[in-house]
Amino acid sequence: MEPYVEGAARAGGRGAPPVYAGRTVALLTQHRKELVITPVLEAGLGCVVELVTGFDTDRFGTFTREIPRPGTLVETARKKARQGMVLSGLPLGVASEGAFGPDPVIGFMPWNVELVIWVDDALGLEVMGTVANSRTNFDHLVTADWDELSAFARKVGFPDHHLVVRPDGADDPRVRKGLSDWEALEGAFAWALAQSAGGRVFVETDMRAHANPTRMTNIRAAAEDLVSKLRCPCPACRAPGFAVAGRVPGRPCELCGTPTPEPVAEVHRCPRCGHEQRAEPDGAPARAPAAVCPFCNP
Protein backbone atom coordinates (compact mmCIF):
# COMPACT_ATOMS: atom_id res chain seq x y z
CA MET A 1 0.00 0.00 0.00
CA GLU A 2 1.30 3.45 -0.94
CA PRO A 3 2.41 5.56 2.05
CA TYR A 4 -0.16 8.30 1.65
CA VAL A 5 -2.96 5.76 1.17
CA GLU A 6 -1.93 4.35 4.56
CA GLY A 7 -2.33 7.87 5.93
CA ALA A 8 -5.90 7.89 4.66
CA ALA A 9 -6.54 4.53 6.31
CA ARG A 10 -5.38 5.87 9.68
CA ALA A 11 -7.54 8.96 9.21
CA GLY A 12 -10.66 6.88 8.84
CA GLY A 13 -13.39 8.99 7.20
CA ARG A 14 -14.83 12.17 5.77
CA GLY A 15 -13.26 15.28 7.22
CA ALA A 16 -10.09 13.35 8.09
CA PRO A 17 -6.63 14.94 7.78
CA PRO A 18 -5.89 15.35 4.06
CA VAL A 19 -3.74 12.68 2.44
CA TYR A 20 -1.92 15.11 0.13
CA ALA A 21 -0.32 17.20 2.88
CA GLY A 22 3.08 18.50 1.80
CA ARG A 23 2.81 17.15 -1.75
CA THR A 24 3.24 19.39 -4.80
CA VAL A 25 0.64 19.54 -7.56
CA ALA A 26 1.05 21.20 -10.96
CA LEU A 27 -1.53 23.79 -12.05
CA LEU A 28 -1.34 24.90 -15.68
CA THR A 29 -3.20 28.14 -16.42
CA GLN A 30 -2.61 31.42 -18.23
CA HIS A 31 -5.85 33.08 -17.11
CA ARG A 32 -5.05 33.56 -13.40
CA LYS A 33 -7.17 30.67 -12.12
CA GLU A 34 -4.51 30.11 -9.47
CA LEU A 35 -6.02 33.08 -7.62
CA VAL A 36 -9.07 30.99 -6.65
CA ILE A 37 -7.82 27.39 -7.00
CA THR A 38 -4.56 27.61 -5.04
CA PRO A 39 -5.93 28.93 -1.73
CA VAL A 40 -8.74 26.36 -1.71
CA LEU A 41 -6.45 23.39 -2.40
CA GLU A 42 -3.65 24.44 -0.09
CA ALA A 43 -6.00 25.18 2.81
CA GLY A 44 -8.15 22.07 2.30
CA LEU A 45 -5.50 19.50 1.43
CA GLY A 46 -2.26 20.88 2.84
CA CYS A 47 -0.66 20.49 -0.58
CA VAL A 48 1.60 22.95 -2.41
CA VAL A 49 0.31 24.21 -5.76
CA GLU A 50 3.01 24.89 -8.34
CA LEU A 51 1.90 27.31 -11.05
CA VAL A 52 2.99 26.15 -14.50
CA THR A 53 3.32 28.87 -17.14
CA GLY A 54 4.88 29.28 -20.58
CA PHE A 55 2.27 27.18 -22.39
CA ASP A 56 -0.59 28.66 -24.42
CA THR A 57 -3.71 26.95 -23.06
CA ASP A 58 -5.72 28.52 -25.90
CA ARG A 59 -4.48 25.52 -27.90
CA PHE A 60 -7.20 23.60 -26.05
CA GLY A 61 -9.92 25.92 -27.39
CA THR A 62 -11.14 29.49 -26.97
CA PHE A 63 -14.50 30.81 -25.80
CA THR A 64 -14.39 33.25 -28.72
CA ARG A 65 -14.37 30.28 -31.12
CA GLU A 66 -11.18 30.96 -33.09
CA ILE A 67 -9.93 27.57 -31.87
CA PRO A 68 -12.55 24.86 -31.22
CA ARG A 69 -12.22 22.73 -28.10
CA PRO A 70 -10.64 19.41 -29.18
CA GLY A 71 -12.86 17.22 -26.99
CA THR A 72 -15.37 17.15 -24.17
CA LEU A 73 -15.16 19.27 -21.03
CA VAL A 74 -13.55 16.37 -19.11
CA GLU A 75 -11.15 15.45 -21.92
CA THR A 76 -9.94 19.02 -22.26
CA ALA A 77 -9.45 19.47 -18.51
CA ARG A 78 -7.52 16.21 -18.43
CA LYS A 79 -5.25 17.35 -21.27
CA LYS A 80 -4.50 20.57 -19.41
CA ALA A 81 -3.68 18.74 -16.18
CA ARG A 82 -1.42 16.27 -17.95
CA GLN A 83 0.36 19.01 -19.88
CA GLY A 84 1.12 20.72 -16.58
CA MET A 85 2.43 17.43 -15.19
CA VAL A 86 4.70 16.96 -18.21
CA LEU A 87 6.09 20.48 -18.00
CA SER A 88 6.68 20.30 -14.24
CA GLY A 89 7.74 16.66 -13.99
CA LEU A 90 5.21 16.11 -11.18
CA PRO A 91 2.96 13.05 -10.71
CA LEU A 92 0.07 15.24 -9.54
CA GLY A 93 -1.80 17.70 -11.73
CA VAL A 94 -4.87 19.90 -11.46
CA ALA A 95 -6.65 21.91 -14.14
CA SER A 96 -9.91 23.72 -14.77
CA GLU A 97 -12.28 23.88 -17.71
CA GLY A 98 -15.66 25.56 -18.15
CA ALA A 99 -18.59 25.65 -20.53
CA PHE A 100 -21.49 28.02 -21.18
CA GLY A 101 -24.87 27.70 -22.81
CA PRO A 102 -28.61 27.53 -22.09
CA ASP A 103 -29.79 25.86 -18.90
CA PRO A 104 -30.53 22.11 -19.23
CA VAL A 105 -34.15 22.29 -18.00
CA ILE A 106 -36.03 24.99 -19.88
CA GLY A 107 -33.24 26.22 -22.16
CA PHE A 108 -33.90 29.85 -21.34
CA MET A 109 -31.43 30.96 -18.67
CA PRO A 110 -27.66 31.21 -19.30
CA TRP A 111 -25.80 28.35 -17.64
CA ASN A 112 -22.21 27.83 -16.47
CA VAL A 113 -20.57 24.44 -15.84
CA GLU A 114 -17.14 24.45 -14.19
CA LEU A 115 -14.92 21.43 -13.66
CA VAL A 116 -11.66 21.16 -11.70
CA ILE A 117 -9.88 17.85 -12.28
CA TRP A 118 -7.25 16.22 -10.06
CA VAL A 119 -4.94 13.65 -11.69
CA ASP A 120 -2.78 11.38 -9.52
CA ASP A 121 -0.47 9.12 -11.51
CA ALA A 122 0.99 7.52 -8.37
CA LEU A 123 -2.40 6.06 -7.46
CA GLY A 124 -3.82 5.97 -10.98
CA LEU A 125 -6.93 7.99 -10.21
CA GLU A 126 -8.83 11.06 -11.30
CA VAL A 127 -11.24 13.06 -9.15
CA MET A 128 -13.40 15.90 -10.44
CA GLY A 129 -14.98 18.79 -8.60
CA THR A 130 -17.90 20.39 -10.40
CA VAL A 131 -20.45 23.16 -10.16
CA ALA A 132 -23.31 23.98 -12.54
CA ASN A 133 -25.66 26.92 -12.11
CA SER A 134 -27.18 30.06 -13.62
CA ARG A 135 -24.78 32.36 -11.74
CA THR A 136 -23.22 33.80 -14.88
CA ASN A 137 -23.36 36.96 -16.99
CA PHE A 138 -22.94 34.97 -20.24
CA ASP A 139 -24.71 37.09 -22.88
CA HIS A 140 -24.34 38.88 -26.23
CA LEU A 141 -25.85 41.71 -28.26
CA VAL A 142 -26.00 42.71 -31.92
CA THR A 143 -26.42 46.46 -32.32
CA ALA A 144 -25.54 49.59 -34.26
CA ASP A 145 -26.36 51.91 -31.37
CA TRP A 146 -23.79 53.04 -28.80
CA ASP A 147 -26.42 53.77 -26.15
CA GLU A 148 -27.82 50.25 -26.49
CA LEU A 149 -24.33 48.79 -26.21
CA SER A 150 -23.63 50.95 -23.14
CA ALA A 151 -26.79 49.70 -21.42
CA PHE A 152 -25.83 46.10 -22.22
CA ALA A 153 -22.32 46.65 -20.86
CA ARG A 154 -23.64 47.98 -17.56
CA LYS A 155 -26.10 45.07 -17.31
CA VAL A 156 -23.34 42.44 -17.59
CA GLY A 157 -21.04 44.15 -15.08
CA PHE A 158 -18.63 46.04 -17.31
CA PRO A 159 -15.88 47.12 -16.78
CA ASP A 160 -15.12 44.59 -13.99
CA HIS A 161 -16.36 41.98 -16.46
CA HIS A 162 -14.60 42.43 -19.78
CA LEU A 163 -16.20 42.44 -23.23
CA VAL A 164 -15.40 41.19 -26.74
CA VAL A 165 -16.36 43.06 -29.92
CA ARG A 166 -16.59 41.93 -33.56
CA PRO A 167 -18.04 43.35 -36.77
CA ASP A 168 -21.28 41.78 -38.01
CA GLY A 169 -21.59 38.46 -36.16
CA ALA A 170 -20.39 35.83 -33.72
CA ASP A 171 -18.00 34.09 -36.11
CA ASP A 172 -16.33 37.07 -37.75
CA PRO A 173 -12.57 36.43 -37.47
CA ARG A 174 -11.86 40.10 -36.73
CA VAL A 175 -12.07 40.44 -32.98
CA ARG A 176 -11.03 42.69 -30.10
CA LYS A 177 -10.90 40.93 -26.74
CA GLY A 178 -10.34 41.89 -23.14
CA LEU A 179 -12.00 45.30 -23.35
CA SER A 180 -11.90 46.59 -19.77
CA ASP A 181 -12.57 50.34 -19.85
CA TRP A 182 -15.11 52.63 -21.52
CA GLU A 183 -12.61 54.33 -23.79
CA ALA A 184 -11.38 51.00 -25.17
CA LEU A 185 -14.95 49.77 -25.62
CA GLU A 186 -16.02 52.90 -27.48
CA GLY A 187 -12.97 52.63 -29.74
CA ALA A 188 -13.67 48.97 -30.47
CA PHE A 189 -17.32 49.76 -31.22
CA ALA A 190 -16.33 52.48 -33.72
CA TRP A 191 -13.77 50.13 -35.32
CA ALA A 192 -16.22 47.23 -35.63
CA LEU A 193 -18.96 49.49 -37.03
CA ALA A 194 -16.57 50.83 -39.68
CA GLN A 195 -15.51 47.27 -40.59
CA SER A 196 -19.04 45.86 -40.70
CA ALA A 197 -20.62 45.03 -44.04
CA GLY A 198 -24.09 45.19 -42.51
CA GLY A 199 -23.64 48.15 -40.22
CA ARG A 200 -23.91 46.01 -37.07
CA VAL A 201 -21.61 45.19 -34.17
CA PHE A 202 -21.52 41.91 -32.25
CA VAL A 203 -20.58 42.31 -28.57
CA GLU A 204 -20.33 39.49 -26.04
CA THR A 205 -19.13 38.86 -22.53
CA ASP A 206 -15.51 37.77 -22.22
CA MET A 207 -15.74 34.39 -20.48
CA ARG A 208 -12.02 33.89 -19.85
CA ALA A 209 -11.47 33.44 -16.14
CA HIS A 210 -9.26 36.47 -15.55
CA ALA A 211 -11.79 38.65 -17.41
CA ASN A 212 -14.88 37.44 -15.58
CA PRO A 213 -15.12 37.65 -11.76
CA THR A 214 -18.46 35.83 -11.71
CA ARG A 215 -16.90 32.85 -13.44
CA MET A 216 -14.02 32.94 -10.95
CA THR A 217 -16.58 32.46 -8.17
CA ASN A 218 -17.84 29.28 -9.83
CA ILE A 219 -14.30 27.97 -10.37
CA ARG A 220 -13.66 28.46 -6.66
CA ALA A 221 -16.84 26.50 -5.86
CA ALA A 222 -15.72 23.65 -8.13
CA ALA A 223 -12.34 23.59 -6.37
CA GLU A 224 -14.14 23.40 -3.01
CA ASP A 225 -16.20 20.46 -4.31
CA LEU A 226 -12.96 18.76 -5.38
CA VAL A 227 -11.41 19.20 -1.93
CA SER A 228 -14.51 17.76 -0.28
CA LYS A 229 -14.22 14.63 -2.42
CA LEU A 230 -10.47 14.24 -1.93
CA ARG A 231 -10.94 14.38 1.83
CA CYS A 232 -13.17 11.30 1.76
CA PRO A 233 -11.27 7.97 1.61
CA CYS A 234 -12.67 4.78 0.11
CA PRO A 235 -13.84 2.36 2.82
CA ALA A 236 -12.31 -0.53 0.86
CA CYS A 237 -8.89 0.64 -0.39
CA ARG A 238 -8.62 3.97 1.48
CA ALA A 239 -7.74 5.94 -1.67
CA PRO A 240 -9.04 9.54 -1.71
CA GLY A 241 -12.05 10.58 -3.73
CA PHE A 242 -14.88 8.31 -2.55
CA ALA A 243 -17.85 10.38 -3.71
CA VAL A 244 -21.23 10.37 -5.42
CA ALA A 245 -20.90 8.95 -8.92
CA GLY A 246 -24.57 8.45 -9.77
CA ARG A 247 -28.12 8.44 -8.48
CA VAL A 248 -30.84 5.77 -8.51
CA PRO A 249 -34.28 7.15 -9.47
CA GLY A 250 -37.51 5.91 -7.94
CA ARG A 251 -38.46 7.96 -4.88
CA PRO A 252 -42.22 7.36 -4.44
CA CYS A 253 -44.78 10.09 -5.02
CA GLU A 254 -46.17 11.76 -1.90
CA LEU A 255 -49.74 11.21 -3.12
CA CYS A 256 -49.94 7.94 -5.03
CA GLY A 257 -46.67 6.15 -4.32
CA THR A 258 -45.67 5.82 -7.99
CA PRO A 259 -41.87 5.78 -8.50
CA THR A 260 -40.64 9.14 -9.80
CA PRO A 261 -37.41 10.36 -11.44
CA GLU A 262 -36.33 11.75 -8.04
CA PRO A 263 -33.41 9.79 -6.52
CA VAL A 264 -34.10 7.12 -3.94
CA ALA A 265 -30.39 6.50 -3.42
CA GLU A 266 -26.95 7.89 -4.28
CA VAL A 267 -24.16 5.63 -5.50
CA HIS A 268 -20.76 6.44 -3.99
CA ARG A 269 -17.81 5.01 -5.94
CA CYS A 270 -14.05 4.86 -5.50
CA PRO A 271 -12.09 6.25 -8.47
CA ARG A 272 -9.28 3.78 -7.80
CA CYS A 273 -10.73 0.35 -6.97
CA GLY A 274 -14.34 0.86 -8.10
CA HIS A 275 -15.88 -0.07 -4.74
CA GLU A 276 -19.50 1.16 -4.51
CA GLN A 277 -21.95 1.88 -1.71
CA ARG A 278 -25.52 3.13 -1.82
CA ALA A 279 -26.87 5.71 0.58
CA GLU A 280 -29.98 7.84 0.91
CA PRO A 281 -29.50 11.38 -0.47
CA ASP A 282 -28.54 13.83 2.26
CA GLY A 283 -31.57 15.76 3.50
CA ALA A 284 -33.97 14.28 0.95
CA PRO A 285 -37.60 13.73 2.07
CA ALA A 286 -38.98 10.19 2.06
CA ARG A 287 -41.52 11.09 -0.63
CA ALA A 288 -41.19 13.04 -3.87
CA PRO A 289 -43.50 15.99 -4.67
CA ALA A 290 -46.51 15.15 -6.84
CA ALA A 291 -45.34 17.76 -9.36
CA VAL A 292 -42.63 15.35 -10.59
CA CYS A 293 -44.84 12.25 -10.58
CA PRO A 294 -45.48 10.73 -14.04
CA PHE A 295 -48.94 9.52 -12.86
CA CYS A 296 -50.19 12.58 -10.93
CA ASN A 297 -48.63 15.09 -13.33
CA PRO A 298 -48.22 13.35 -16.70
Image (cartoon, rainbow, N blue to C red):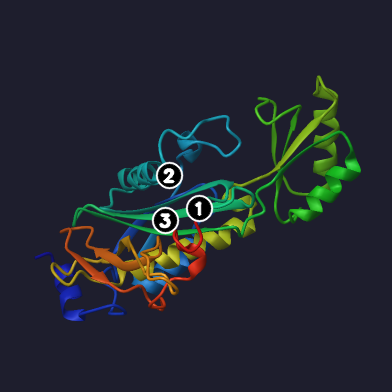
Q: First in sequence: mark 2 or mark 3?
A: 2
Which callout, 3 or 1, points to the residue nearer the camera? 1
Name the secondary structure under disc 1.
strand
**Residue 39 disc label:** none
Q: Name the amino acid type tagged 3.
A: Val
The residue under label 3 is 116
**Residue 113 disc label:** 1
Q: Residue at x 45, y 37 (%)?
A: 60
The answer to the question of whether label 1 and label 2 lie on touching residues, with beta carbons closer than 8 A, is yes
Residue 149 in the image: above or below residue 272: above
Name the secondary structure under disc 3.
strand
Q: Residue at x 81, y 23 (%)?
A: 195
Q: Position of residue 17 (x, y in %)?
A: 28, 79
Q: First in sequence: mark 1 or mark 2?
A: 2
Q: Name the amino acid type tagged 2.
A: Leu
Q: Residue at x 27, y 64 (%)?
A: 267
Q: Residues within 10 Å of mark 2 (few under 14, many from 20)?
A: some
